[in-house]
């Protein structure tokens, strides 16, 4: 069977170059429509504010922890010392990167702070974690299991460059929870005494 009879439209192939020219020279959109887009700064202002706020809270907490370096450090382990030194540096880097708009780089800096806090928490547990009281001691459970996962997931999402809002929320959750715990402790001490 001769196939050439069935495919008689060989001469009717579309001109790909002409079609590409027509698509790039679209006159339906006026040239002024390109200039009416909002600038990138205003579109990402909320993301910038959220990351800068989380980094500022971490920086404040990290600077407050630096005071421990001037005292007797003989009882502190190497991981705790690393956390005390690296936390303000990472928080300052995250703050600067968030302010100048490098969100993909600010999120991993905050994620590294979360992972350093997890390492410090695991180093401070003297005899291991008490798995029998997993749900009774909810704060320690979230510090040991939930927060490192949130930090690692946020770093992964930021590295891919997708859904930076989701990565920001994931990396800010440990900061917000720790801030809430500290404020509730301070309020409790203020009301009931120590």
Image: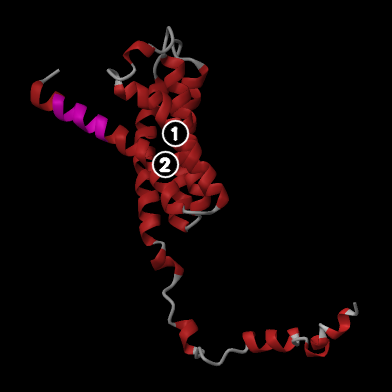
For the point 45% across and 40% down, the residue is 110
In the image: residue 22, left or right of residue 107: right
Q: Which mark is residue 171?
A: 2
Q: How crowded is mark 1: few (under 14 residues within 10 Å), some or many (20 or more)?
A: many
The answer to whether residue 184 is magenta is yes
Q: Position of residue 159 (x, y in %)?
A: 56, 47
The image quadrant of residue 23 is bottom right
In the image, which residues are magenta?
180-188
For the point 43% across and 55% down, the residue is 99
Q: Is residue 106 above or below residue 28?
A: above
The image quadrant of residue 22 is bottom right
The mark nearer the N terminus, 2 or 1, is: 1
Q: Residue 172 carries which label?
A: none
In the image: residue 38, left or right of residue 78: left
Q: Do the residues labelled 2 and 1 touch (CB within 8 Å)?
A: yes
- Which residue position is annotated with label 1? 114
Question: How far apart, in angstroms, are the residues tagged by discs 2 and 1?
Answer: 8 Å
As rendered, which of 122 and 54 lies closer to the eye? 122
Q: Quadrant of the C terminus?
A: top left
For the point 35% across and 11% down, the residue is 132
Q: How crowded is mark 2: few (under 14 residues within 10 Å), some or many (20 or more)?
A: many
In the image: residue 118, left or right of residue 8: left
For the point 46% across and 11% down, the residue is 74
The answer to whether residue 61 is magenta is no
């Amino acid at each position: 069977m001769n196939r050439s009879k069935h495919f008689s439209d060989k001469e009717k192939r579309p001109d790909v170059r002409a079609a590409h020219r027509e698509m790039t020279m679209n006159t339906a959109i006026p040239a002024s429509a390109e200039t009416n887009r909002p600038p990138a700064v205003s579109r990402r202002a909320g993301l910038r504010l959220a990351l800068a706020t989380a980094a500022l809270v971490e920086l404040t907490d990290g600077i407050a922890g630096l005071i421990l370096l001037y005292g007797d450090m003989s009882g502190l382990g190497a991981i705790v010392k690393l956390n005390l030194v690296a936390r303000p540096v990472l928080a300052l880097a995250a703050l600067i990167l968030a302010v100048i708009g490098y969100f993909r780089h600010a999120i991993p800096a905050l994620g590294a702070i979360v992972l350093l806090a997890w390492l410090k928490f695991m180093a401070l547990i003297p005899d291991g974690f008490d798995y029998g009281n997993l749900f009774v001691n909810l704060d320690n459970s979230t510090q040991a299991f939930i927060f490192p996962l949130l930090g690692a997931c946020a770093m992964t999402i930021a590295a891919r460059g997708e859904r930076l809002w989701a990565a920001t929320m994931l990396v800010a959750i440990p900061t917000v929870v720790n801030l809430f715990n500290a404020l509730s402790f301070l309020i409790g001490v203020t009301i009931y005494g120590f």
